[in-house]
Image: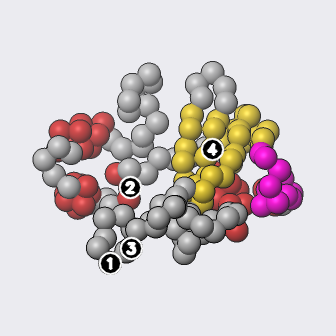
Amino acid sequence: LTGTIFERHHFPIEEMFYILKEMEAKSTLQISEELGRDYDSKYARRISLEGVVEVEEVYVHAGEKGKKRDVGRRRGLRKRGRGTWENDKPPVLTIVKRGVEPEVWFCVVENLKGVKVKLKEWIGGEVVLNTDEYTIYHGIAEEIEG
């Protein structure tokens, strides 16, 4: 299956074709129940970082859009600085794996304190980690190795 859309998935090929066939007519929950899998496993992608990797955090202006109980802001968010879920500016990690076949992942995180834990979980080999030197990345090499 090398070179196809199934290349990095760990489902049997029969399940992959079943998912593709049924995804237009059925919900993800229904398909996962029929296959006896966790709801999240249908979309789960295994992130394995190695080689040259860039990590950047961005803060997306978000919030509960379209809800009548929320009064719209006249000029956007007034608070400056880095965001959190509570102030409608959740942090999103952007991870770019460089190389012959570059890959990009986006990960919405509740807070940036868990970034080291996530990166440690995803690193699968020798990594050169390029960051913007924000303090959340300080000491990450020692934490990953140790």
Residue holding disc 2: 41
First reached walking from the N terminus: tag 4 or tag 3: 3
The answer to which of 79 and 143 lies nearer the viewer is 79
Question: In terms of secondary structure, where does tag 4 sit?
Answer: strand
Q: Secondary structure at mark 1?
A: loop
Horizontal side of residue 110 vs 62, given as left or right: right
- Of the residues tagged 2 and 4, which is closer to the observer? 4
Q: Please identify the quadrant where the N terminus is shown.
A: top left
Q: Which mark is residue 71?
A: 3
State which region is magenta.
Answer: 131-142
Q: Is 94 or 144 nearer to us in this picture?
A: 94
> Which image quadrant for residue 17?
top left
Question: Badge 1, how many Cα within 10 Å: few under 14, some, many 20+?
Answer: few
Q: CA distance from mark 2 to mark 4?
A: 21 Å
Residue 60 among magenta residues: no
Residue type, label 4: Ile
Labels 4, 3: front one: 3
Reading the image, the residue beneath label 4 is 95
